């Protein structure tokens, strides 16, 4: 790898405020906001809209959509066309 062309790869906290979940990982993402982590150190924090802690696919709290009802309604509506 060439020196001086790659962004700084350092510890960063990604926080999902809606799910009250945060994870410390390494990233090249930058932020001016900081948070004090459990180890007493201060890290840059990046707030995210959705994470594995709040996404319906991972939590198992997804909605079941009645696709059969929609198909039947479509067929009734356009059966004569």
Image (cartoon, rainbow, N blue to C red):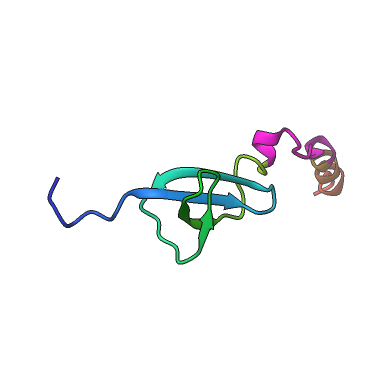
- For the record, the magenta segment spans 56-69
Residue under the point 70% across and 35% down = 59
Residue furthest toward the bottom?
32
> Where residue 81 appears, x then y in whole percent?
79, 49
Percent of width and height locating residue 60: 72, 32
| Residue at (82% x, 38% y) in the render | 66
Q: Is residue 23 left or right of residue 59?
A: left
The image quadrant that residue 5 belongs to is: bottom left
Viewer-closest of 56 and 30: 30
In-image side of 62 versus 11 (left or right): right
Instruction: Judge from the rendering whether residue 79 lies leftward or rightward of residue 55; answer left or right.
Output: right
Return the x and y of residue 24 as percentages of the image width and height.
49, 44
Above or below — where is 21 with respect to 4?
A: above
Residue 4 on the magenta span: no
70, 62: nearer the viewer = 62
- The residue positioned 81% from the left and 45% from the top of the image is 74
Question: x, y percentage for residue 65?
Answer: 79, 40
Q: Is residue 64 magenta?
A: yes
Residue 36 in the image: above or below residue 64: below
In the rendered image, the residue lying farthest to the front is 40
Q: Is residue 54 above or below residue 32?
A: above
């Amino acid at each position: 790898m060439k020196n001086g062309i790659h962004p700084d790869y350092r510890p960063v906290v990604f926080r999902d405020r809606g799910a009250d979940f945060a994870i410390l990982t390494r990233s090249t993402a930058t932020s001016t906001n900081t948070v004090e982590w459990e180890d007493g150190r201060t890290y840059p924090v990046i707030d995210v809209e959705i994470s594995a802690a709040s996404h319906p696919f991972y939590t198992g709290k997804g909605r079941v959509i009645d696709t059969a009802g929609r198909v039947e309604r479509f067929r009734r509506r356009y059966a004569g066309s």
